[in-house]
Image: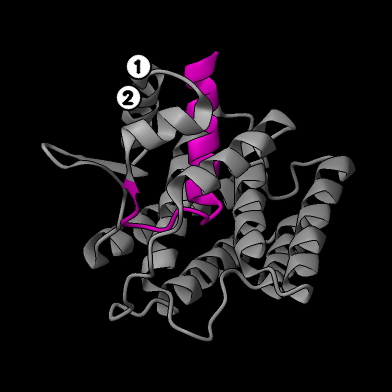
Amino acid sequence: MVKQHVFASTREAIVGRKLPPGTKLTEDVIAAAFNCGRGPVRWALARLQDEGLVTLVPNRGAFVAEPAPDEAKHLFGARRILEGGVVRHLCRRLPDEAWDCLVECIEAEDHAHQNGNEAAALRLSGDFHLLMARLTSNPVVEAMLRELVSRTILAIAVHQRAGTSGCRTHEHRRLLALMRAGDADEAVREMDNHLGALEAGLDLSTKRKAAPDLRAVLQAAAATTRSGPAGG
């Protein structure tokens, strides 16, 4: 369906940091990018607002959300609560192939870091956390974490201190080793420290970046989602 394609492509562009926080999402430009009417665009923007990725301002239009400092703190707090439970649930409960999938995700993130593609590395880091949620086989937990991870990516885009990176793969590897060994208390502590380090990398004085070309970004995102969007 057209509206689903508009939603998925726009979401991909936001989470992939092609459309930074504060970017105005002009309905006419989006409709032209997808060769559709305004109806599918409005539906997609409403869904993105429901996920906390877009802010709809009366008489002004739609904008990529800009998490405020307090919101960023709440997002990380919520992730600590939720992901601590995910880690405890998964300890020593997974088959070998599930552990292998988590290792592959870490290796892909490593590769992105080595190539200097920090936006891709951040996205792959989110995929690692989402994969753990998916492995609980609880769709409610997965949906909740999917929203939190996406909104955290926006918070990092707004507030990340210059010279810092997102998740650190050695922390992911240490977390995985503790989980596989069944050391639930240490694994939960490691997750808490890991998310705390991410939050500590935020600089609340970070200034907004220049807005990109909305139509060009969405046309590129549309082409990507036709061939299969990235996970997470």
Name which residue type carries label 1.
Gly
Please check the rendered image and state whether residue 78 is part of the magenta-colored stretch, yes or no.
no
Q: Return the residue at label 2.
A: 42
Which quadrant of the figure contains the N terminus?
Answer: top right
Please check the rendered image and state whether residue 17 is part of the magenta-colored stretch, yes or no.
yes
Residue 39, which numbered label?
Answer: 1
Where is residue 76? Give x, y as percent: 39, 60
- Between 85 and 61, which is closer to the camera in this rendering? 61
Q: Is residue 14 visible?
A: yes
Disc 1/disc 2 C-alpha distance (Å):
5 Å
Which quadrant of the figure contains the C terminus?
Answer: top right
* Residue depicted at x 78% and y 75%: 114
Quadrant location of residue 173?
Answer: bottom right
Where is residue 71? Give x, y as percent: 26, 58
Q: Is residue 140 visible?
A: no
Q: Which residues are magenta?
A: 1-24
Give SS at disc 1: helix
* Residue depicted at x 64% and y 29%: 137
Pointer 1 with pointer 2, Cβ within 8 A: yes
Give SS at disc 2: helix
Residue 66 lies left or right of residue 104; in this view the side is left
Q: How is the image coloured?
A: one colour
